[in-house]
Image (cartoon, grey):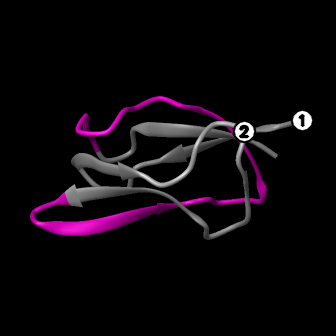
Amino acid sequence: MAKEDIESEVTGTVWKIETKVGDKVKVDDVLMILESMKMEIPVLATEDGVIAEFLVEEEEPVTEGQVVAVLDT
């Protein structure tokens, strides 16, 4: 299997993780929701696959371009 890094598009805080390691996801499924400037920003799967790991936890700050999750594709 190949690995696909999922990056944050914004600087903000992890508000809620919607999925868990081992979940099968399809492209554009919501993996987590970030909060930035009082807006909720979804982080979407970029490919079909299985969530291999999360590199962040809820309430953790993230920066734009930071890898937040890894998919097995």
Q: Residue at x 54, y 39 (%)?
A: 69
Q: In which quarter of the image is residue 50?
A: top right
From the top left corner, tell me how far across and down residue 41 is, in percent: 32, 66
From the top left corner, tell me how far across and down residue 35 is, in percent: 22, 58
Q: Which of marks 2 and 1 is nearer the N terminus?
A: 1
Q: In which quarter of the image is residue 62?
A: top left
Rate crowding at label 1 as few (under 14), some (14 to 19) or many (20 or more) other CA atoms within 10 Å: few
- Residue extending farthest to the left is 37
The magenta-colored residue range is: 36-63
Q: How far apart are marks 2 and 1 (CA)?
A: 14 Å
Q: Which residue is drawn at 72% across and 39% down?
A: 22
Residue 4 is covered by the magenta coloring: no
**Amino acid at the residue labelled 1:** Met
Q: Residue at x 40, y 65 (%)?
A: 42
Q: Nearer the viewer, mark 2 or mark 1?
A: 2
On the image, numbered disc 2 is attached to which residue?
22
- Callout 2: SS: loop
Rate crowding at label 2 as few (under 14), some (14 to 19) or many (20 or more) other CA atoms within 10 Å: few
On the image, numbered disc 1 is attached to which residue?
1
Seen from the viewer's position, the closer of residues 8 and 50 is 50
